[in-house]
Amino acid sequence: MENYVELKSPFTGGKVKEVSTTEEHEFRKEKLLVHVRYYVCEDTGERFTTTEQDELLFNELYSQYRVNHGIPFPDEIKEIRLHYGLNYQQMTKILGFGINQYAQYEKGQMPSESNGKLLSAIMNKQFMLHLLEDSRAEFDKREYEKVLHSILTSETKPENEVLKRIIYRDTRRSIYNGFGQINVAKVSEMIKFFICKESGMFPTKLNKDLFYSDFLHYKLHGQSISGLQYQAIQYGPVPFHYDTIYDNIDGIRKDIVIVHDMESTCLNCSAFDAKAFNEQELKTLEIVLSKIKPLTTQEVIDRSHEEDAWRNHFEGFQLIPYSEAFSLKFV
């Protein structure tokens, strides 16, 4: 797919066009099919990329590799450390990593396959305790006791795990959830963002806000915001089991209103937490809000029916792969 843009060629100062396509790229001797975007100079035919385009390619490349080899994502690696209440130095001693290695993994550096499997394994508390015992010589007695106590007293929150299963169903990262972080708090605040900004809204329109936000963010950054899966149904793309999601988020009120002589459910809430999002995510949400807020529910449905994401997957109400993000027309 090609689009003409206002950007000027760095070679001639002339016109350029942006190309969006798929290519096979190799990473650690493994060939993966990824989406790429680049510019082509009209005068010379030379190809060039921006930092953002390069980041998009590598984000998708790394995401596929992590999924294929069971390597945790950076946010998951950070959550492991915070779950046990340990610092970088303590994690390094237990795992036998190099200096600053754990911190680099949290920032996005790709672990080796063996280190990746080790990181996955320490999600199990008993295995973590086994590694601590093996690395006992790395700690003085006082620090060892402190680390042992921190690991022993670490607990999962059952209510979060239950809610996670209700909202996400499938917690594995894949192209069907945009390799997004499985985070109940973030999806909750994302939903509240649109409800608050619209001063109350109907689920049908909210579904489109979420769809366009996640798919646009994937198109721009190679990862969704919410980690939700989307399904093509009669009224356009919707989060999979969206009704269950809205029923299980605290802070959302359901009001029954009369519209066209029929009872309808209007969603309301008093506030959202902007700190749940990073700068890129918040910018994506604002872009989608500016596009969809002026439209009626029916207009939004009609726009979503023009998307390949809906057209290609409506038959049989299929799940929509995030690869369809690169053909978005409305945003």
Image: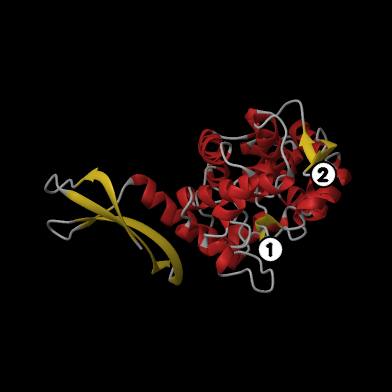
Q: Residue at x 66, y 66 (%)?
A: 319
Left or right of 201? Residue 295 is left
35 is higher (above) or lower (below) than 194 = below
Circle 2 or circle 1, nearest the eye: 2
- Image coordinates of residue 194 in percent, x first then y, are 66, 36
For residue 233, the mark is 1
Q: SS at mark 2?
A: loop
- Image coordinates of residue 110 in percent, x first then y, are 51, 54
Question: Which badge, 2 or 1, is on the more N-terminal residue?
Answer: 1
Q: Could you tell me the amino acid type at mark 2?
A: Asp
Q: Which quarter of the image is occupied by the N terminus?
A: bottom left
Q: Which residue is mark 2?
A: 261
Q: SS at mark 1?
A: strand
Left or right of 254? Residue 138 is left
Decide if residue 125 is in sight here: no
- Image coordinates of residue 40 in percent, x first then y, are 23, 57
- Image coordinates of residue 250 in percent, x first then y, are 83, 36
Query: In front here: 109 or 90?
Result: 109
